[in-house]
Image: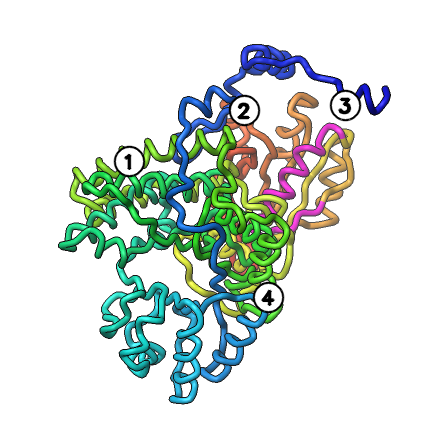
Amino acid sequence: MTIHTMKNTSFKKVNDIQWKEFALQSLKGKTFESLITKTAEGIELQPLYSESDFLERLTTIRPLKEKSGWTIAQQTYATDCNDFIERLYESIKNGNESVFIDDTTQFEWCDEALVKLATLLKKYPVYILSTSPSNPLLTVFDIIPENERSAIHGVVSIQGWNLPVGYVNIRTLGADLWDAHHKGADAVTELALTLSLAAQHAEKSYDFNQFTNAFFVRLAVDTHFFMEIAKFRAFRILWQAFGSAYGQNIIEPIPILATTSMRSYSKLDPYVNLLRAGNETFSAAMGGADIITVHPHDILTNPTSSSIRYARNLQLVIKEETHTSKVLDPAGGSYFIETLTSELVEKAWTSFLTIEKNGGYNAFLSSGALNEQLEKRFDEVATGTHSLIGTNGYAELVDASTSAVKDRNFEGRLAKPFEELRTEFAINQPKTVLLTFGELKDFKQKADFVTGFLATGGLQAFWSPEFSDVSSAMDWLDTEKPDYVVICASTTSKPDLIDEVLQHRKSSIKFDVAGKYDASSTEKWLAKGLNGFIYKGQNRIDKLKTILQHWQGGEWK
């Protein structure tokens, strides 16, 4: 085929029905519904989105974002005030665009350092969140002359502390969903609670415009890439609807602060956190966040100069390589994201009205609904329904005891139960072997699964040689003297094999079987002294905790 022919080649247009028919042929007996994924928000993600979906739900958000791009708000980690100023100067020189302060900045401040900080506040926007009202750093706002305070802009949100007069361009009324996010809230709930908090603040203000000028939103951004893009976009549409409900014809945009979520961060494999942070940062940028803060991948232990630089450079690379900072709505026009955004808007607005009807934001938090969402998330991670690479899947057996150099307490981290198990088993663990029968093809799938299953709790399993008979296997066990054995064999081959192993088992060894079997076999084997089973879909935390509880001090209890 010549280049000329290729340039003039066209493809036959395929409609949705034809595509679905072809997809069903490819599924080889599975239903089309098996391609649909249901999210925590109750939204069904389709395998294909077409122009018809887009046209049915088309809603533009471009007028609702004030300008393209976003501000890089990098945390500064320091040991004292002078170190803080020095590191802040360096951070700004290398790409940081603001002064960002949170609860990591807690030390005494000298007058000289406060004067330098005040000078920086006049040049760069300031974002202060989640710090103590007694933090000496806050005295910087007192030393700035009143006639210069209007030049300072940004966000300062501290419970129990009031900003001195004159800072007319600093926003202090916020809908900060950081805590709700880490208590389990899904995207719909976060958006609904944001509106509920906005309503709470708006009701206290005699003037809606005055409220708008003081208001900001902070959302944590998680790893569900497309859902997070849609979440940020959905808020802007919801904000327009919210303003219209208050009788406003012109609705001013408000800044959205995005902070990478700690929900999926893990101490066990911190470099995976770097990938998570990159995913989250890009989705926040695509969704239209105005200010983005990226946590270093080792924030749970001890951030280094390298990890802080990586966190900052994530944003710089995205700006430089993708040019998303030059586009007002980078994700606009995507059939999938437009549809997902619209679905979030509908569900969030309905949820918001329900929350308000039942007493508002505080009443919702007291209802326990978030606890249910968080418990569901922990259960999904424990059973493997939700994957945390490096934690509940593809876990690398490293020394977990060295990971806890410093442990910042972030509520709602899904990896924490696995981390606790890893720490316990690092102290002492049973000698574990997988007792394999038959050829490699007969047991490999089960043995691989069990090896990975146990590794998530810090248990190292060694594979036995391939045995064809129980007698040889038992002789080998007598020599190796393991504490814990998992039998891995084909479900169909030698049905009496497990009976024979249990008949000759040593009482000092705990035996489990890989796989899930019928009720009659299960009851029979348990009655013969089998400890239990390891299988896909099992709650790993419960199983590993049971092993730990029975194994204490170097012997079975």
Dot placed on the residue nearer the N-terminal end, 2 or 4: 2
User: Does the segment drawn in magenta span residue 57?
Assistant: no
Q: Tell me the amino acid under the disc marked 1.
A: Trp
Which type of secondary structure does the marked residue at label 2 adopt? loop
**Neighbour class for label 3 at 10 Å: few (<14), some, many (≥20)?**
few
**Neighbour class for label 1 at 10 Å: few (<14), some, many (≥20)?**
many
Q: Is 11 left or right of 60, judged from the image as shown?
A: right
Pointers 2 and 4 in contact (CB under 8 A)? no
**Of circles 3 and 4, which is in front?**
3
* Coordinates of residue 59 in the picture (x, y in percent): 39, 32
Q: Is residue 520 visible?
A: no
User: Does the segment drawn in magenta span residue 448?
Assistant: yes
Pointers 3 and 1 in contact (CB under 8 A)? no
Q: Tell me the amino acid under the disc marked 3.
A: Lys
Quick one: 79 or 399, which is closer to the camera?
79
Q: Tell me the amino acid under the disc marked 2.
A: Pro
Which type of secondary structure does the marked residue at label 4 adopt? helix
Q: Which residue is mark 4?
A: 309
Majority SS type along the magenta span = helix
Dot placed on the residue nearer the N-terminal end, 1 or 4: 4
* Coordinates of residue 346 in the picture (x, y in percent): 33, 31
Q: Which residue is mark 3?
A: 7
The CA span between labels 3 and 2 is 30 Å
The CA span between labels 1 and 4 is 39 Å
Task: Give the residues drawn in magenta, as a range.
Answer: 441-462
In this rendering, is residue 106 above or below 410?
below
Dot placed on the residue nearer the N-terminal end, 3 or 2: 3
* Coordinates of residue 481 in the picture (x, y in percent): 69, 50
Q: Is 358 left or right of 259, judged from the image as shown?
A: left
Q: Is residue 408 visible?
A: yes
Q: Which residue is mark 2?
A: 47
